[in-house]
Image: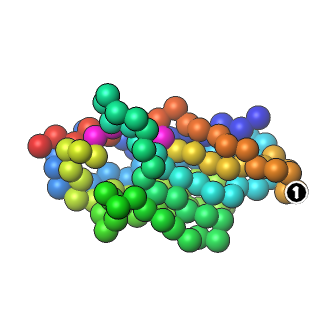
Amino acid sequence: QVQVVESGGGLVQAGGSLRLSCAASGSIGRIDMMAWYRQAPGKQREYVAVISSDGSTNYADSVKGRFTISRDNGKNTVYLQMNSLKPEDTGVYYCRTEIATGRLSAAMNYWGKGTLVTVSS
């Protein structure tokens, strides 16, 4: 069984910074892609950033230059460093990971339950 848990959310003023963490635990043989999504109140969930197993990254245009995604493979953890935060960054941030329980197994998607980020103006 696999668990994915986000942490690090909170209330911050516009222009401030937060660092989110997402840790995977359980029967993990291999972690492929790790990504962050967010959902603002009344809106659909949207993609924020992704990091692949080889460390390559990609960002949504709305966060480029402000957010940085990274991962610690030894800790099965992905991070999202968020700088120059804006009120429109407010929302619940979710982690999605592709995890295989065995080294040669097919990977499956696992989502965390989210962590709330509130940016005040």
Decide if residue 75 is in sight here: no
| Coordinates of residue 114 in the picture (x, y in percent) | 47, 35
Q: State the residue at coordinates (71%, 38%).
A: 2
Decide if residue 9 is in sight here: yes
Left or right, 107 with respect to 23, comes to right
- What is the image's colouring? rainbow
Q: State the residue at coordinates (76%, 56%).
A: 30
Residue 64, picture quadrant: bottom left
Residue 61, picture quadrant: bottom left
The magenta region covers 90-94
Q: Of helix, strand and loop, which one carries label 1?
A: loop
In this rendering, the answer to whether 55 lies above or below 12 is below
Q: State the residue at coordinates (30%, 63%).
A: 66
| Coordinates of residue 75 in the picture (x, y in percent) | 63, 56
Left or right, 64 with respect to 37, comes to left
| Coordinates of residue 78 in the picture (x, y in percent) | 54, 55
Left or right, 115 with respect to 29, comes to left
| Coordinates of residue 29 in the picture (x, y in percent) | 80, 52
Residue assigned mark 1: 104
Q: Quadrant of the C terminus?
A: top left
In this rendering, the answer to whether 16 lies above or below 117 is below
